[in-house]
């Protein structure tokens, strides 16, 4: 509700990660992909780890008319995993990508009010000091007026 009160200046970003998909699992651009949430093995084959961001531009008059965009970052299973720093780097990439300008920017500038929705895992949870530091850096780097990080149960 807070974000809708300042709809022209706010963005809501839901981030989730660590969904592993085995290589060789068929997918089509014309069909939705459905996978179980979070770390699941599919045999001993190599897997890809996804970090998913749903970016929502609130609409003060109608929830059904919200503008949303989805971004997926794919990482190799054997990489060092994700951390609050990798999430910040993902968000920086999104801000620099012109295809997300409609939801992340207004008048060519980054929207000054950000609401991040994260799970309670250690790489995102705002109760961990290392994450607080990264969120403060994000706040400064994007010159935000307001940043709130809200948690929900994993899964």
Image: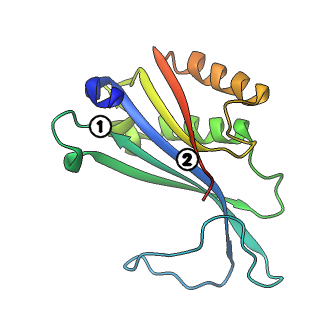
Q: Based on the displayed image, in which of its 4 quarters is residue 111 positioned?
A: top left
Label pair 2/1, CB-CB below 8 angstroms? no
Q: Is residue 24 left or right of residue 11?
A: right
Dot 1: element: loop
Question: For mark 2, what is the residue?
Answer: 15
Where residue 8 appears, as percent x and y from the top left, is 26, 26
Q: Residue at x 72, y 66 (%)?
A: 39
Q: Based on the displayed image, in which of its 4 quarters is residue 127 positioned?
A: top right
Q: Which mark is residue 58?
A: 1
Q: Residue at x 78, y 76 (%)?
A: 46
Label 2 to label 1: alpha-carbon separation: 16 Å
Q: Is residue 26 left or right of residue 63?
A: right
Where residue 82 appears, as percent x and y from the top left, is 74, 48
> Mark 1 or mark 2, which is nearer the start of the sequence?
2
Quarter of the C terminus within the rendering: bottom right
Q: Is residue 94 left or right of residue 29?
A: right
Where residue 32 appears, as percent x and y from the top left, is 42, 75
Q: Mark 1: give few (<14), some (14-19) or many (20+) Cα within 10 Å.
A: many
Q: Residue at x 37, y 43 (%)?
A: 56
């Amino acid at each position: 509700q807070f974000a809708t009160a300042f709809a022209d200046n706010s963005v809501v970003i839901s981030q989730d990660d660590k969904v592993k998909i085995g290589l060789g699992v068929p997918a089509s651009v014309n069909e939705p992909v459905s996978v179980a949430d979070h770390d699941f093995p599919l045999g001993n084959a190599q897997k890809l780890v996804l970090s998913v961001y749903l970016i929502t531009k609130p609409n003060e008059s109608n929830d059904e008319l919200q503008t949303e965009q989805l971004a997926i970052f794919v990482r190799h299973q054997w990489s060092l995993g994700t951390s609050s720093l990798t999430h910040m780097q993902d968000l920086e990439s999104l801000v620099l990508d012109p295809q997300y300008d409609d939801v992340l920017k207004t008048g060519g500038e980054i929207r000054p009010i950000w609401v991040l929705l994260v799970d309670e895992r250690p790489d995102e949870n705002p109760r961990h000091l290392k994450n607080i530091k990264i969120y403060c850096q994000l706040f400064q780097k994007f010159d935000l007026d307001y940043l709130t990080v809200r948690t929900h149960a994993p899964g």
